[in-house]
Image: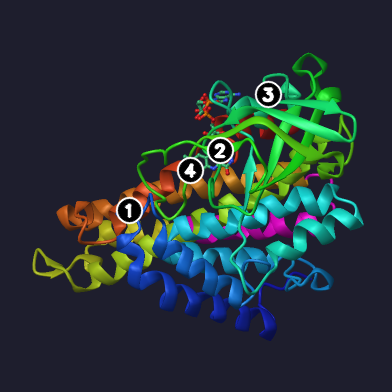
């Protein structure tokens, strides 16, 4: 039988995440844009997130983590994103960077890479480096078999040498480690593909200027440049030729996270606009009592719930190794991100010029919503993959 109720444990987790977001993130949320290049406010929040075990949440207890399962991580992500999509992306991306390690690493690598990410003393965030200046969506397209990836990995005895430039990774310049998508020869397609972990202090690793952008200012993005970066072969996840497979399994897990970040963004905007429309009097009565406005909220509430259910189905299907889990993940991502864009746009609309004003939060939710339709696989690509899978 289906059971839509949360266990007591899960309710407590949700409460804890909501309290963290209200206490640590909300008071400084409006300052993230001005603080984007430095990220001082975000760094302080990350330290607190590490202290309470949020950064290492999905990591197994034996490596110092909190053992959060696939569904629990979604519960936490929604609460974070309901307050700030950027902070949810920073923490979510750290979890996303753990996924290929959890999937592809051996026991020695898990100990070496996961334990620091679970630290409660330091805020060690992670990053995934996929996108390159000439190739974004194609690197995430399984049909392209990483043939458009030009980050070169050269085998040199016991070492690997990495050369190339990635663009836009979340947590660029601040991460403790980066999972880098590369190839020994793009012409080999999947057979040449590989994922290599690069720690922050490796010689030859450098970063570009923070990318100016529209929203999600808690999340720092810049070029990540690999200039003859030498790492031991023990930093390779799986073997040469496994990169594309591990990456695509990783994306199946991570895309629903993009879906849940969108559910949170949509809910945050919705709750604010609803409160506003209950108070704002237009035409002699509160806005919410106008049937057109009420119907808009009814549709928004329904879409947000539907998006959340798709995300939970996707999370559940991953725990079951369901044969359609990839499709379910893509569906959740496409539907939830489109919902967030529609809902946040409507929230600006129903609040009139106040919705458009930076003095109110809904315009920020709208700006944050936009990128989730693009990152973790643009929706046009994912719709094609859903169609092809039917
Ligand atoms: C805030 C932020 C965070 C990010 N975080 C990360 C990160 O952590 N790691 C990382 O590697 N990258 C990250 N990115 C980059 C992001 O994943 C890429 O920008 C994205 O994959 C799209 O790549 P692109 O910009 O090169 O667009 P392109 O690949 O040039 O695509 C442009 C557009 O073409 C359309 N399109 C693409 N493919 C198809 C197709 N097959 N069929 C039809 N239409 C298609 C879509 O509309 C797409 O938006 C981030 C970007 C931002 C802005």
Is 275 one of the magenta-colored residues? no
Residue at point 75% right, 35% down?
230
In the rendered structure, which disc, 4 or 3, sits on the residue that comes first in sequence? 3
Q: Mark 1 sits on what residue?
A: 33
Residue receiving disc 3 = 149
In the rendered image, residue 101, in percent from the top left (x then y), is placed at 78, 51
Please tell me how crowded label 4 is: few (under 14), some (14-19), or many (20+) other residues with Cα within 10 Å.
many
> Which residue in the protein does label 4 denote?
221
The reply to whether dot 4 and dot 1 touch (C-beta < 8 Å) is: no
Horizontally, residue 341 falls left or right of residue 113, namely left
Q: Is residue 192 above or below residue 221?
A: above
Our reading of the magenta stretch's main secondary structure is helix
Q: Is residue 293 visible?
A: yes
In percent of the image, x 55 and y 81: which residue is there?
Answer: 15
Is residue 318 magenta-colored?
A: yes
**Is 349 positioned to the left or the right of 135 in the image?**
left
| Residue under pointer 2 | 206
Q: What is the span of residues highlighted in magenta in the rendered image?
A: 302-324
92 on left or right of 368: right
Earlier-in-chain disc, 4 versus 1: 1
State which quarter of the image contains the C terminus: top right
Q: Nearer the viewer, residue 273 or 213?
A: 213
Could you tell me how far apart the alpha carbons at marks 4 and 1 are, in whole angstroms?
Answer: 13 Å
Residue at mark 4 to residue at mark 3: CA–CA distance: 19 Å
């Amino acid at each position: 039988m289906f059971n839509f109720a949360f266990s007591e444990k899960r309710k407590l987790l949700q409460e804890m995440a909501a309290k963290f977001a209200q206490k640590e993130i909300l008071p400084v949320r409006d300052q993230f844009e001005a603080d984007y290049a430095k990220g001082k406010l975000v760094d302080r929040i990350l330290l607190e997130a590490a202290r309470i075990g949020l950064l290492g949440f999905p990591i197994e207890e034996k490596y110092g983590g909190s053992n959060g399962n696939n569904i629990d991580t979604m519960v936490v992500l929604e609460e974070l994103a309901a307050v700030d999509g950027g902070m949810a992306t920073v923490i979510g991306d750290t979890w996303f960077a753990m996924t290929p390690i959890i999937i592809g690493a051996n026991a020695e690598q898990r100990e070496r890479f996961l334990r620091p990410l679970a630290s409660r003393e330091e805020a060690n965030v992670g990053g995934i480096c996929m996108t390159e200046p000439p190739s974004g969506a194609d690197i995430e397209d399984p049909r392209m078999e990483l043939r458009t990836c030009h980050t070169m990995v050269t085998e040199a005895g016991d070492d690997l040498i990495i050369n190339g430039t990635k663009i836009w990774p979340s947590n660029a310049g601040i991460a403790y480690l980066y999972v880098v998508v590369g190839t020994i020869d793009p012409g080999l397609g999947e057979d040449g593909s590989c994922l290599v972990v690069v720690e922050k202090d490796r010689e030859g690793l450098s970063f570009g200027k923070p990318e100016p952008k529209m929203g999600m200012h808690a999340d720092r993005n810049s070029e990540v440049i690999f200039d003859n970066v030498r790492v031991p072969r023990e930093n390779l996840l799986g073997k040469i030729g496994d990169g594309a497979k591990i990456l695509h399994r990783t994306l199946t897990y991570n895309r629903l996270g993009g879906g849940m970040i969108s559910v949170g963004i949509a809910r945050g905007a919705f709750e604010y606009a609803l409160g506003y429309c209950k108070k704002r009097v237009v035409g002699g009565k509160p806005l919410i009592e106008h049937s057109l406005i009420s119907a808009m909220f009814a549709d928004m509430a329904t879409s947000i719930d539907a998006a959340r259910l798709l995300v939970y189905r996707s999370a559940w299907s991953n725990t079951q190794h369901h044969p359609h889990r990839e499709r379910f993940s893509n569906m959740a991502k496409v539907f939830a991100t489109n919902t967030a864009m529609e809902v946040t746009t409507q929230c600006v609309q129903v609040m009139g010029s106040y919705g458009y004003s930076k003095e109110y939060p809904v315009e920020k939710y709208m700006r944050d919503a936009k990128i989730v339709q693009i990152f973790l696989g643009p929706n046009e690509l994912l719709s094609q993959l859903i169609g092809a899978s039917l």
